[in-house]
């Protein structure tokens, strides 16, 4: 049978692929350190687990909820956004989804017509391009400089009559880059001028290190906000990847249509997870600070070790946010003779038993992504293995 042509051009998620290869090796009894995954290793905080348990015990989570989420959860999200960024969203401007991934997926279904273009500054998170294609659109890469920064001129170079949206991910997966207020203002002014929707994925906003400051797109004044959809969720900040709760917030018309699509596609995100998320957004926030401090400690110890590996270069310096390193390994490729970062990542997994993700998955060859969302002992061990790998291959 001929399968959908649209689906046949979609690549499996490379991060999940490496992860599953690493998991298979682990299942085979091989001691793999998997730095390929994009999830915090911390447990979901107890107050959040407790809220979920109570919602089960008192029977609240036994039933369907409204397709776009429980009113109490929308309220909690609205309050959280207002407390953090000083902007008020009405509940009709918020749509709760099965993870931020589903918010993005649904949004692209709603905004794209065949061959509409979505600008993706490189490097970009692996699912954006495939989700755009699944919605019938065309991902268009935007070139960035050696520090992953871009200007309005770079956007303008790719803009056509078909340009519908720009994905802006800050702090960025995979590079940890955080856009400055001035950069954001210039980009948003450009977007409004050319009627381009900015999809602002701020899922790593709580994970900022060494005093780096973060500006949300919501903090630049209301004049841009009819051209902005905010994407966020509980996965990274509250260590809740398995609960699958994310959201989109933005113009009512777009949110209403997302609700229609979700009503047919998913009905609603799991009720028990929504009750947990009410506590995440509305309850005690101290666990977020603790987890952030833990990531910072790991970054500060691990980054200098990794930056000293032969041929591993960090032209943008130590990352400001998220929990990934994204070194330029072109020199390491020259030293070792591997043709590309895909072959390098495979060799590192096979020979050094460390799982990493090739940069091709993020639209940028000659790089690899390593997650430091794992304990320091494993990070130290991974560094030793990589050092040995490089020593042997050079
Ligand atoms: N956006 C970015 C940049 C991500 O890295 C991820 C997860 O890796 C997501 C969105 C999706 O998060 P979730 O679907 O778990 O909420």
Image (cartoon, rainbow, N blue to C red):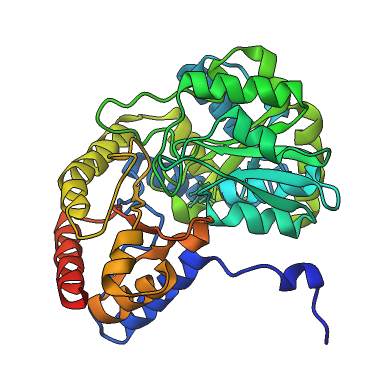
Quick check: can you spot residue 34?
no
Q: Nearer the viewer, residue 103 or 123?
A: 123
Quick check: can you spot residue 380?
yes
In this image, 358 relative to 271: left or right? Answer: left
Q: Nearer the viewer, residue 205 or 256?
A: 205
Quadrant location of the N terminus in the rendered image: bottom right
Residue sitting at the far front: 334
What residue appears at the point 72 percent right and 32 percent down from the top-left corner? 197
Q: Is residue 251 above or below residue 141?
A: above
What residue appears at the point 68 percent right and 13 percent down from the top-left corner? 223
Q: Is residue 218 above or below residue 13?
A: above
In this image, 354 relative to 245: left or right? Answer: left
What residue appears at the point 85 percent right and 53 percent down from the top-left corner? 114
Image quadrant of residue 380?
Answer: bottom left
Q: Is residue 241 above or below residue 216?
A: below
Q: Position of residue 348 (x, y in %)?
A: 30, 74
What residue appears at the point 52 percent right and 14 percent down from the top-left corner? 86
């Amino acid at each position: 049978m001929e399968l959908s042509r649209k689906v046949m051009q979609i690549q499996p998620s490379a991060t999940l692929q490496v992860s599953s290869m690493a998991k298979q090796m682990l299942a085979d009894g091989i001691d793999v350190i998997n730095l390929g995954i994009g999830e915090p290793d911390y447990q979901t905080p107890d107050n959040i687990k407790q809220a979920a348990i109570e919602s089960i015990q008192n029977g609240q989570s036994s039933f369907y909820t409204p397709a776009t989420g429980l009113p109490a959860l929308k309220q909690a999200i609205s309050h959280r956004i207002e407390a953090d960024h000083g902007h008020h969203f009405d509940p009709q401007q918020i749509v709760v989804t099965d993870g931020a991934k589903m918010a993005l997926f649904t949004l692209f279904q709603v905004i794209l017509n065949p061959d509409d273009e979505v600008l993706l500054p490189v490097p970009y998170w692996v699912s954006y391009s495939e989700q755009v294609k699944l919605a019938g659109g065309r991902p268009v890469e935007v070139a960035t400089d050696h520090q992953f920064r871009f200007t309005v001129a770079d956007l303008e170079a790719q803009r056509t009559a078909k340009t519908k949206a720009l994905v802006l991910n800050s702090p960025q997966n995979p590079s940890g880059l955080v856009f400055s207020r001035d950069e954001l203002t210039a980009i948003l002014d450009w977007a409004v001028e050319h009627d381009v929707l900015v999809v602002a994925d701020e899922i790593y906003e709580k994970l900022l290190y060494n005093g780096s400051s973060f500006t949300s797109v919501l903090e630049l004044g209301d004049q841009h906000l009819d051209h902005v959809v905010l994407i966020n969720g509980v996965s990274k900040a509250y260590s809740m990847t398995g609960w699958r709760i994310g959201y989109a917030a933005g113009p009512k018309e777009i949110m209403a249509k997302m609700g229609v699509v979700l009503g047919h596609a998913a009905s609603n995100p799991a009720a028990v997870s929504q009750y947990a998320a009410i506590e995440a957004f509305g309850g005690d926030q101290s666990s977020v600070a603790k987890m952030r401090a833990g990531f910072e400690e790991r970054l500060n110890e691990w980054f200098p070790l990794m930056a000293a590996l032969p041929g591993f270069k960090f032209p943008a310096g130590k990352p400001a946010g998220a929990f990934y390193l994204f070194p330029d390994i072109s020199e390491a490729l020259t030293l070792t003779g591997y043709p590309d970062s895909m072959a390098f990542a495979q060799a590192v997994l096979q020979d050094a038993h460390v799982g990493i993700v090739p940069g091709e998955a993020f639209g940028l060859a000659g790089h690899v992504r390593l997650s430091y969302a794992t304990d320091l002992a494993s990070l130290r061990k991974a560094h030793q293995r990589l050092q040995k790998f490089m020593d042997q291959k050079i």
